[in-house]
Image (spheres, rainbow, N blue to C red):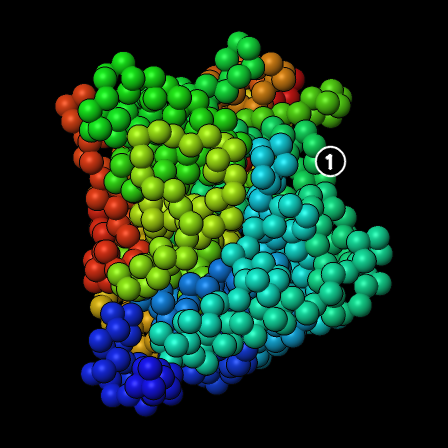
Amino acid sequence: MLLLLVMAVWLFSGKAPDSFYRVLPAYSPDPEQWWRETPLTPQQVTQQRLPAAVINARDESRFKETTAENTAGNQLTEDSAKQILFGDTHVHTTNSADAFMYSLPVIHGAVGAFPPAYACDYARFVSQLDFYFLTDHAESFTPQQWRESIESVQQCNRQAGDSPDLMAFIGWEWTQVGATADKHYGHHNVLFQSDAFDQLPKRPIAAGGAGVSTIATRSEESKQPGILKLLDPRRQGYYAAYNKWVELMAATPPCDPGAPTTELPLDCFESVSTPDELIGRLRQWGFDHLLIPHGTSWGFYTPPGATWRHQLHKSKLSAQATQLIEVYSGHGNSEVFRDFASRKRDEQGQWTCPEPQENYLPSCWQAGNIIQQRCLAEGQTAEECQQRAVRARHNFVQVDTIHGFMTVPDSQPEEWLDAGQARDVFLPAFNYRPRKSAQYGLALQDFTEPQSPRRFRWGFVASTDTHSARAGHGFKQSQRLTTTDSNGVADPFWASVNRATADLPAAGAHSLSPEEIEPLKAGIFASEFERTTSFMSSGGIAAVHAEGRSRSAVWDALKRREVYGTSGHRILLWFDLLNAPEQGTLPMGSETSLAQNPRFRVSAKGSFKQLPGCPDYVVTALSKRRLKRMADGECYNPSDQRYRIDRIEVVRIRPQMSAEESVPPLIEDQWQVFECEPDQSGCTVEFTDESFTDSQRSALYYVRAIEEPVGTVNGGNLRASFDQQGQAVSTEPCYGDYRTSANDDCLSPLGQRAWSSPIYVDYRR
């Protein structure tokens, strides 16, 4: 016993030789000492900026060309003088609860903390963005962290100079999740133009009540167990910092919900439950802001049956306040509608499991298949096993939340095949919820007030939604574990530790009822995290058509919706209406009314192909250690060759004219497709809606510019194999944990793309 005690003290002290620690499967030496920095240790941004020649060359390549062939009337158009600037509107650091959790040493590929200063350095030197927004979770902030985040953004902007190489903005994420569809509003980013303390709210406003979505709750129960310090003693300080941070959150008292937000003390935690409450409090401050929904179709947190109709009807403010929507991020695509559902109501109003469709296998259906296969393996009769399958499907659809998969005890990712997934969607979100897609929302109108029907009129942006301060990291399809949020336990040892702490039922040939899984919903295995990691991508990017290189120019472009998103590559895109009544030409994001058929032009240029490594001026500016940790030797490093634009796709959506009108026929994707010549100079097409005046109804139009295919991180998602009848028979998940090599980027060929903001054309009699 004395010998064991001595060995424990020796291990805990961290003084044993490296060879001894390697006996523990979880342990690896830490020659770079990543874990000495924590999110509680403020960092300084690097005191250099990009060379002026780099910025000048960047700007010169992003103006619209004006030639006789591509300019109506051979005259300069207003947007010819606008340049395209690229940025990231959704950046997390380890000031966010989930980001801090993912940075712990037990996580595969983790290399410690990335506080806000890293976001500035990464955006300036590694990804070479023009702007970014820091948007950590409001639910995670302490008063000190909010203050330090603003100071970090201010540091970044001071370093940018009078002709900025980078513009940093601040905001937060309001991370709401409803337990059921009728209480679900989803995640929204709140963005601000200014970085001055007196032009920002005194505290972030979080999601409150039952709608909080954050890995670490503001309670000391969220602390990491003390055994981690014993099992991994050399990093004990990092675990201690995490627990200290939880203590600081828990010690922040809640604000008085009845007091005006402007009169609350600085050091309280403020929260609201609905978008209208959030908008109301933001209006009390009076500061210019943007509210951007994101991750709307993500099924790993969105309850089954969620729809925009509920929010459009119940929220009197959000239809006007949400001018932009994030259609794509590193957590998947939320753009497109597909006519399938995870469950349906029968004529008696009861939930039932729909049968499989050509491009969709409902998870409830596969739950029955799994139970049936287990039952037959036990030697039960075919009739008995079929009855159990029917019961399993019934149990699954009765669960109102994301936890339906738990009705199949101890199920493994491969058993589910590709159930719940949108097979024919570009990099879709996991467990896709099509009635929360951007397309479905744009097709809806609420006729509660018949004289002024309410509808959404969004502009489109994309982002990374990075959780490691790596803003705009989609420029190269590589380094999966650091350029995506795909993660998991580091090795089988930590997997066994996690498993040992879970009280899960053993695998069996009977499904569990909703009542039986209720006590399990709060556990560590209460999500389909293992399958979700196959849907994490390198993320998107936002582009603005700006009237100059300045903060106000970026902000004004966002406000007027003259924006677009890409899947990460810096595609150049212009989309114009050519025959507006007074203006003549209107850019993407505009709205107008016409009594004639609308005529449009699209111009697109492919992104620059990337060279390996980092430019010399980046290697010189950053310390070797900092550059390795942030980028591991890979930066934005454009060649003089561009990817070719493969095709232009046009989407037309005609909003409802009555509450009873069926939505699916109103969404025409693809309405038109134009194949492009293999030309480095890009692709320009024109088209007219010849049926607009005959239909006598309003419409909106947007385009996708799609590049030639390249190997794409997680481009195959679960990498399903199918039989001759089109049924999935196996999958090869791209795990975020030790089961998939850190060197395997899980590449599959896909065409990177850009989504324009819609142009809204109302019919005028």
- Sort mark 1 into few (<14), some (14-19) or many (20+) by Cα contacts within 10 Å: few
Depicted 204 relative to depicted 42: above or below: above
How far across and down, in percent of the image, does residue 374 sit? 25, 30
Image: 122 above or below 691:
below
Under circle 1, the secondary element is loop
Residue 331 visible at all:
no
Q: Position of residue 728 (x, y in %)?
A: 23, 30
Q: Nearer the viewer, residue 646 or 12?
A: 12
> Which residue is labeled 1 in the image?
316
Which of the 4 image quadrants contains residue 684? top left
Name the residue nearer the viewer: 198 or 692. Answer: 198
758 relative to 65 in the view: left or right: right
Q: Residue at x 63, y 17 (%)?
A: 659
Identify which amino acid the numbered label 1 is placed on.
Lys
Which quadrant is the C terminus positioned in?
A: top right
Asked whether, in this view, residue 624 is left or right of residue 431, the answer is left
Residue 262's x, y, as percent?
81, 61
